[in-house]
Amino acid sequence: MDPTQLTLAEARLAIASGNLTPLALTEAYLERIAALDGELHSFVLVTREAALAAARAAAAPGRSGILNGIPIGLKDIYKTAGIRTTAGSRRYLDHIPNEDAETWVRLRGAGAILLGKQETHEFAIGGPDFTLPFAPARNPWNTAHYPAGSSSGSAVAVAAGLCAAAMGSDTGGSIRGPAAYCGIVGLKPTYGRVSRRGVFPLSYTLDHCGPLTRTVEDCAIMMQALAGHDPLDPGSADVPVPDYASALATRLDGLKIGVIRHFHERDAVAAFGPENAPSTAYAAAFDSALNTLEQLGAQLVDVELSPLIDYLDTNRLIMIAEAYALHERDFRERPQDFGHHMFARIALGAFLSAADYVEAVRQRRELCLEFARLFDRVDIVVSANATGPAPRIDQVPFWGVFERASYTAPYNLTGVPALSVPIGFEDGLPLAFQIAGKPFDEAGVMRVGHAFERASEFRHARPPIAASLRPA
């Protein structure tokens, strides 16, 4: 069997049993990258020789880590000492950091092998922009379509079998959006659960780092290596880390799950117009997913929050204000170094007042309290993700990031863990929903995601391009 078709968990077992070597697995991924990435554009830099050297070292006696011999990719906003890190921008086109992101330090310490850096929207907001140094990544289910952003390359590479897992970042949905459109799993952990030190910021209040994987089990393995307090990250929380794998289950008996329907059934159309109504196929897939959760033993109850637009307006105002503060000096001194998408979106922050920002921070606190009260009644909540299939990449509106409903941003605003899991297909393109939980309950969120995943067949699906190199 082609080793690149193994899940991360399966590859770990194969390496541990001696049936697969880290070198053979790494070589297989590098072969697929060379064959397929000219069409997919998921990598902006492939660290071939370093990856092969790391793979040889991973086979040495006594090497053990939870990710030993597992090849992964990093979104190109993760700093890597001695390896170019561009944030997808001409501003840092020749930037070679002298430090590693703490997340990469932990992953490498667990034995992971770096295959390279993966395409991102410029500074995690400016895309898809065809004028940037690197072409936007393409959806592996249909390369004429958008993979979402800003962790585009990371999601595409995982879905297409070009790496076992990858790291993305999420300020308003940049892990879970690409996971949904590419048919994989994406976790935005609790704010403070995973270090952000050494990762180019977009918004200090809303930024999260997290994994993109093929399965929830793979996600749990990645989180075991990633989670934990970083005293040098001011946003990091000193909270115990559980054994994530042991929390996974195939039944949900006794679990009470709140269903947030009004975000996608009423609020999106009220705020953004009828074109934001869920597709018929999405509504059916969402209801079918809920039915599966009930069959697994969960009790489902509908819950109500403030309208979706309240969460989105607050999230977007804070994001734009903080992003503009980060880039203001460069915008004034070297505007020519930025793409039009990124510059136009972040420059909106120049027109916000201190009163606007303070009011958004106040409203965020109210909405966080409202959301926290949900968990007095339920253990977990589920809600929609993107309510239709990925659009064509040449038809993504310039201002679409602000003009369309986002079902992911509420979880950035509240900081709670949220997981995107596939629930079906429409026109051959993936659909997904979200599972969210109490702060620092990634284990509970992944428990639900794993049980659902095991009760469905979607985890076995691979995009057509991912099958193109399989042995006959």
Image (cartoon, rainbow, N blue to C red):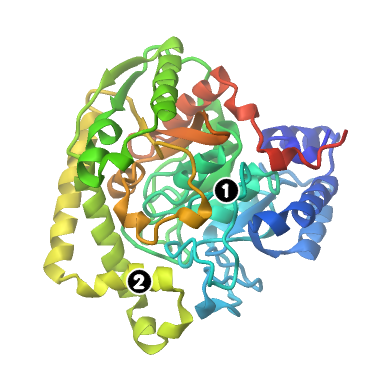
The residue under the point 58% across, 73% down is 133
- What SS does tag 1 mark? helix
The number of numbered discs placed on residues in the rendered structure image is 2
User: How far across and down, in percent of the image, does residue 310 sit?
Assistant: 19, 46
Residue 220 sits above or below residue 415 on the image: above
The residue under the point 42% across, 29% down is 282
Q: Which residue is mark 2?
A: 344
Q: Left or right of 440: which side holds 168?
A: right
Q: Which mark is residue 273?
A: none
User: Is residue 201 or residue 29 the one in the foreground?
Assistant: 29
User: How far across and down, in percent of the image, does residue 77 sit?
Assistant: 52, 64
Q: Left or right of 111: which side holds 433?
A: left
Q: Which mark is residue 155?
A: 1
Q: Left or right of 75: which side holds 260?
A: left
Q: Amino acid at mark 2?
A: Ala
Residue 369 sits above or below residue 444 on the image: below
User: How far across and down, in percent of the image, does residue 420 sit?
Assistant: 46, 37
Q: CA distance from mark 1 to mark 2?
A: 25 Å
Q: Quadrant of the N terminus?
A: top right
